[in-house]
Amino acid sequence: MHESTLEERAKVKRALGNISPQLLLIIILTTMVISLSLSSPFFLTWSNLRNIFDHSSLYIILAIGMTFVISSGGIDLSVGGVAALSGVCMAVAMKSGLGVGAAIAVGLLAGGMIGAANGAVISRLKINPFIVTLGFMSVSRGLALIITGGIPIYGFPRAFTWFGSGHVGPLNPPMLIAAFIAAAAALALNRTRFGYYTLALGGNEEALRRSGVSTRFFKTAVYILCGTTAALCGLIVTSRLNTAEPLAGWMLEMDSIAAVVLGGTSMKGGRGSITGTVIACLLLGVLRNGLVILSIPAYYQQLLIGIIILTAVVFAEVRPRKALVI
Amino acid sequence: MPQNKDRAHNEPFIRVINIRKSFGSVVALDGVNLDFYRGEVTAIVGDNGAGKSTLIKVISGVLSPDGGKLIVNRKSYNFLTPSQAIELGISTVYQDLALVDCRDVATNIFLGQEPLKAGLFVDKKKMNRESEKLLNRLKVHIPSVTTAVEFLSGGQRQGVAVARSINQRGKMIIFDEPTAAMGVKESARVLELIRSLGSDGFAVVVISHNLHHVFSISNRICVLRNGRMAGDFRAERTSPNEIVGYITGTNELNTEVVKRGIFNHA
């Protein structure tokens, strides 16, 4: 008796769990696309869609690293600063005569190193990731300002600006990078030991440790991954603007965290969805674009996006609790 | 001593020698000596704070002792790491079961031991198949190995934790309060499972407060008091009353232990 009601309860929750929240996001996204294309003739043109994809790809890359961190039960507030720092590093490397490839490697390495520092402090000294990454946010932003003296560096070889403004058929490099990273990340999170341990870290870190897995190693790896995706964003932003700007990527951490949570990854850790993150980024992209097309003033856009994210997150976090009561 | 006869040809699986461990000024283990044998269910009893949990955490590598050593396979260790302990065949089913609630049954059973395809991807199908086989063998009834552990009952969760221990090729399986917060029917099932592990040749160690349960499953009962061994008995040659006396300290040190010379009172 007891066990059969438990099984039924499990079935109900599983059924509810299956429709949430990615399917819901797709429904909202579709509704938005349909209503926007009805209200504006510009929305459904290729140049506008291209614009949306182009903008979203930056957020997708960043939010994927963040998905790993959040589903491991952590958070990374340093991504905006890391993006700026690695952009600056690439710029300085190129100005000092390094080739484009080597310069990009230097920038990615810088991002990975800040990630490693985050991970090492969090996993070895067991300090709250919120505080640690808040510290490294300031450290990386400060380093970017010190290196540049606060003055943007501009004018890079074409091989470098190709990453931001080049063309690959009808697409551009950021879209391809985002698509490749999304596919690789989905495989990594759902099908590899690294992904299994990332989710286990968020679900029950002590259980993973007692199973003989080095939690320090995998936790650090998660932050290195996030630092590297932030550095990739730095590459795209810098090459798109043809300028390394020490204040680039301001508030990027908030946007990416919002997208990850909107996509159904649990802030408590243990559950993560790359698909959800990608759809959420597209949804936010369409939303921003739609608000511009409907010529809603910029101040209201900020307010509206905030309200939509809050509603979505409240909805996502409250629902599973209700499902348990059934 | 008759109780040693059946072990005469049988070396202890693990020897715990003069293990000491303190937390600040609190002495949790004050020189504990104990041998564990395969095919035997050993219960460790004692009052709260007697050092039971600390002892098993030292054996399973979760805590490093301050002094003493562990001997496994004739090799001496000053301390073990969790992965070393697992490699040596020491698995622990913790009181909190150490399960990842939001992941499914098969994922939990294979946690840290995931089989790989092409050296990279986790072979989930193999995990599901082998988990089902293992749970059937243990007679643990779970509707589907792809159910998240959070939806299982207490007994089923215990079953998953035991299956994981066995899957880690455990030769020694330690249970910390296996029947705490469990109903009568579920407890009976878990106790049956523990007893069968003993007769299957595992070295089984059980920590429990419930003397009724202890007497129904163990071959041997060891009493810890204030971080020291206070007694070591064959279950059939003692009684709950006598054990309670040693737990509370109203009975003196069990002489059998001293005669066998495995207890170092200094």
Image (cartoon, rainbow, N blue to C red):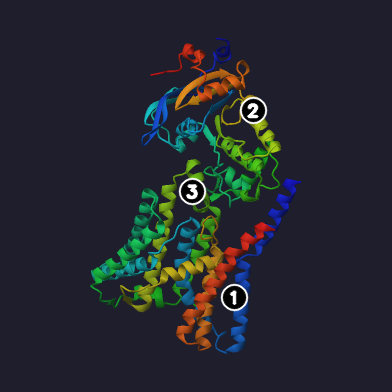
Of badges 3 and 2, nearer the viewer stands: 2
- Label 2 sits on a secondary structure element that is helix
Q: Which residue is mark 1?
A: A29
Mark seen at residue B99: none
The amino acid pointed to by label 1 is Leu
Q: CA distance from mark 1 to mark 2?
A: 61 Å
Residue B139 coordinates in the image, percent (x, y): 70, 36
Q: Specify few, some or many for label 2: CA neighbours under 10 Å numbering under 14, 14-19, or 20 or more.
A: few
Whether residues under marks 1 and 2 lie with C-beta atoms below 8 angstroms apart, the answer is: no
Could you tell which of marks 1 and 3 lies nearer the N-terminus?
1
The amino acid pointed to by label 3 is Glu
Q: CA distance from mark 1 to mark 3?
A: 35 Å
Say if labels 3 and 2 share a chain: no
Q: Which residue is mark 2?
A: B212
Residue at 37%, 48% (x, y): give it: A124
Of badges 1 and 3, nearer the viewer stands: 3
Residue B39 in the figure: left or right of residue A119: right
